[in-house]
């Protein structure tokens, strides 16, 4: 039968390690305490792993009493005190872990950042403003100095269709706002700026017509 002394020891170690730790760190701390594996055929690591599972309702070898430990995620080797797991569960509705760093290896085509900058500069020199070519949103008008010189640049030809070494001209670029830029790329078959502009202008005309036909507000007594 599993020893309660080992169970107490594991709980103390996990508390010392902040309530959650990898099996490697648990083993290191247990070894520092001078503990030895149970039985001649067991390693210290296997002994620790066995007792964590004996007293974890998440495990198929759960002893049936004393649910003290929780495996954070299968295959990670990270264990925590069940009390910590329950507290995390209570907070899960309001707190979400984000920002984990990942390393990705990928092969992709790249844009040249100089062309968009030159496009914006040329439009500013010619018109003094950067206005979305699809919806006519004006950052300067809406945000004042904070929006001066700000806009996004849309490549009319999808990157996937360009051959390596393709030379982009300023006429291949369009000034757009962030919303229109996302919409332009929302479908697999990308809309043209002109097609999106037609959609936006049609919607505006329909709204204006509906507003003109709406009954006027009743005068107040």
Image (cartoon, grey):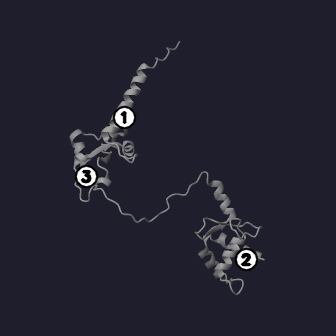
Front position in the image: 159 or 204:
159
Q: Residues within 10 Å of mark 1 (few under 14, many from 20)?
A: some
Residue projecting furthest to the bottom: 40
Question: Could you tell me residue 29's position as x and y percent?
Answer: 63, 78
Locate the N terminus by quadrant: bottom right
Residue 134 seen in this snapshot: no
Q: Is residue 14 left or right of residue 138?
A: right
Callout 2 secondary element? helix
Front position in the image: 122 or 193:
193
Instruction: Kindly indicate the quadrant of the structure image that contains residue 167.
Output: bottom left
Does the CB distance between marks 3 and 1 fall below 8 Å? no
Looking at the rendered image, the disc whose residue lies closer to the viewer, 3 or 1, is 1
Residue marked by disc 2:
6
Q: Residues within 10 Å of mark 2 (few under 14, many from 20)?
A: some
Residue at figure coordinates x 37%, y 44% from the top left: 178
Question: Could you tell me residue 137's position as x and y percent?
Answer: 34, 37
Callout 3 secondary element? helix
Residue marked by disc 1:
200
Q: Which mark is residue 115?
A: 3
């Amino acid at each position: 039968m599993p020893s309660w002394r080992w169970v107490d020891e594991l709980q103390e170690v996990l508390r010392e390690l902040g309530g959650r730790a990898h099996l490697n760190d648990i083993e290191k701390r247990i070894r520092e305490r001078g503990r030895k594996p149970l039985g001649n055929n067991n390693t210290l690591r296997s002994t620790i792993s066995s007792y964590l599972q004996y007293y974890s309702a998440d495990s198929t070898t759960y002893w049936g009493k004393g649910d003290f430990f929780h495996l954070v995620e299968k295959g990670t080797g990270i264990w925590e005190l069940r009390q910590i797991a329950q507290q995390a569960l209570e907070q899960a509705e309001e707190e979400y872990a984000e920002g984990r760093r990942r390393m990705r290896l990928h092969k992709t085509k790249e844009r040249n950042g100089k062309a968009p900058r030159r496009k914006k500069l040329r439009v500013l020199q010619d018109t003094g403003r950067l206005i979305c070519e699809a919806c006519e949103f004006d950052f300067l008008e809406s945000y004042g100095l904070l929006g001066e010189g700000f806009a996004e640049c849309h490549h009319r030809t999808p990157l996937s269709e360009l051959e390596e070494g393709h030379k982009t001209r300023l006429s291949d670029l369009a000034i757009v706002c962030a919303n229109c830029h996302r919409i332009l790329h929302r479908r697999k078959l990308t809309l043209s700026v002109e097609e999106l502009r037609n959609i936006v202008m049609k919607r505006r005309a329909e709204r204006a017509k509906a507003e003109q036909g709406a009954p006027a507000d009743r005068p107040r007594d």
